[in-house]
Image (cartoon, rainbow, N blue to C red):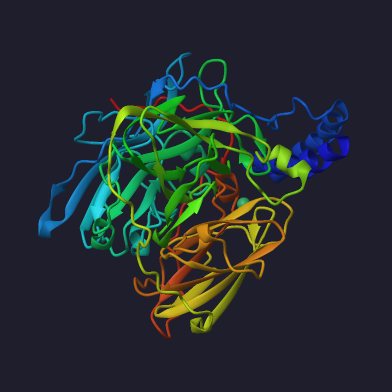
Amino acid sequence: MLAGCFTGCIDLSLGCMTFRLLSRLRRPRAALAAVSVLLVTATVLVLAGCGALGWPARVDTVGKVSFSHALQIPPLATSRTGAAGEKVFDLTANAGTTPLTDVAATRTQGFADAHGQHPDNAYLGPTIVANRGDAVRVNVHNRMHEPTTVHWHGMHLPASMDGGPHQPIAPGATRSPHWRIDQQAATLWYHPHPHGETEHQVSAGMAGMVIVHDEAERALNLPRNYGVDDIPVIVQDARFDSNGQLTTSQAGFIGPLGDTLLVNGTVGAYLPVTTDVVRLRLLNASSSRIYDFQFDDKRTFEMIASDGGLLSQAAAMGSIQLVPGERAEILVQMSAGENATLRSTPPDLGTEASIDASNGGTDAFDVLQLRAADALKPLGAMPTTLTPITRLARDSATVQRSFDLHGFRINDAKMDMNRIDETITVGTTELWKVRNSSAEPHSFHVHDVQFQVLSVGGAPPPVELSGWKDTIYVTPKTEFQIIMRFTDYTDRNLPYMYHCHMLMHEDHGMMGQFVVVEPGQSAGRPPVMQESRGTGSGPRTQEQNHEH
Ligand SMILES: [Cu+2]
């Protein structure tokens, strides 16, 4: 047990705590002194046992959740028609309070529809729905007292519209990214991406869903009635202090882990079901936690879509594991009058037992109860053949790159906003070898494109990785080969990002930058950015800084 503590706690969690402390101390000498103190303290604490150290104890809420609150459904963002037929959305980024628990209103941050019924909303955000081919513009006005950005996770769009760390929105300012939706129907999402502040802002509530429709998806008999049979399921874990405020006080190597689940901002949520099939759009919007979703009665469900859209065939599955940032659409058959509980059982992190224990690998949760009405509206037979996926052939890749994930670094480098790490020529298909050479959990997310997984540790990918992906778990000591095609949107100066989507890792620099250039062009220079505030992740008071 103690040996397990040493591996699980000292190497991992302490490493991360050291990182956190270092990132908050500007003066190197002070940082060194702090680390020495920390190491001595750590030794004492380990000798005292692994119990109450700040790394998370095992969580198991199965059978303990009352399901007393109806699942909140994020409102649909309203839009108006702008110049040249643009579909224009107006969002605000807000700080405020939200009644998440019975203890007290929680200080949160989120997005609101400026013209919606809840213009001060400060947890999650409205769902943006658009069609393939739509020209969209999203005006994002920052009403907070801190800078933010809005990244369109999974969206294919120009680097200048991507909302990465190079596109900050200062307090009081508005940024208006606009682009044409040029990808297949999918469940995407938006969230802040300010360098060093992403974990703090996302875990305070800043996230929303984007649903893209297209003709191929509309031609299928799939549940498509938003909030009725087509349900956003935005899953986050949180930890509340005794005052009902969010805290990230307990963290493994993987990052902060909560003991309470929120679905669409609802604790203990149930969903009234009125149709014999429901489509759940599962989004893991947690900062660190990995879920393995399944039903209490072990019923199978049909997985119909991964990050980038529909699979070629519906896949009957008993469980689906999702890392932060990943999505899956599933169809669940329901019988009249029954209840079915979506759970998360201990995920397979592919790590040693001691590492599992401090990184959520032994945790279980009741997530969402589906409550079927006494009479259900039949939706008819669901399709099994969904949409053709053109496979990108391994030998079509003319460029190979390798990415080694270790510590909080990629290829032994920390994110530098002024350094372009990779230069990609437009029109090229590339094969990326992404390897986690450490013993700890990491993930990999690529902006701009959806990729296909060619192999996992040399074997063909499992069915859940058989479609279009933008985020994958990268199992320790395993190489994932992914293939992608860069078709357009060149900009030699403004980069896209690739990074671990465990937000604490990302904030600590586990990220790199690539530009897509014209043939023969070299990378330019990113615009000079002011140094990030460098506060990094971690617990800190989220001030209510509403502009009124
Ligand atoms: Cu990582």
Left or right placement of residue 180 versus residue 469 in this view: left
Please state, as top left, top right, bottom left or bottom right, where the N terminus lies in the image: top right
Asked where in the image residue 239 lies, by quadrant, the reply is: top right
Q: Is residue 30 visible?
A: no
Please name the residue shown 44% across and 63% down the image: 468
Q: Is residue 126 left or right of residue 102?
A: left
Residue 261 drawn at (x, y percent): 51, 30
Residue at the spot 28% in from the left edge and 58% down from the top edge:
217
The percent position of residue 98, horizontal first and vertical second, equals 39, 23
On screen, residue 65 above or below 306: above
Q: Is residue 264 visible?
A: yes
- List x then y, in percent, for residue 520: 43, 86
Residue at image location 39% in from the left, 80% down from the top: 427
Quarter in which the C terminus is drawn: top left
Locate residue 430 relative to residue 149 in the image: left or right: right
Placement of 510 over or under 252, stated as above or below: below
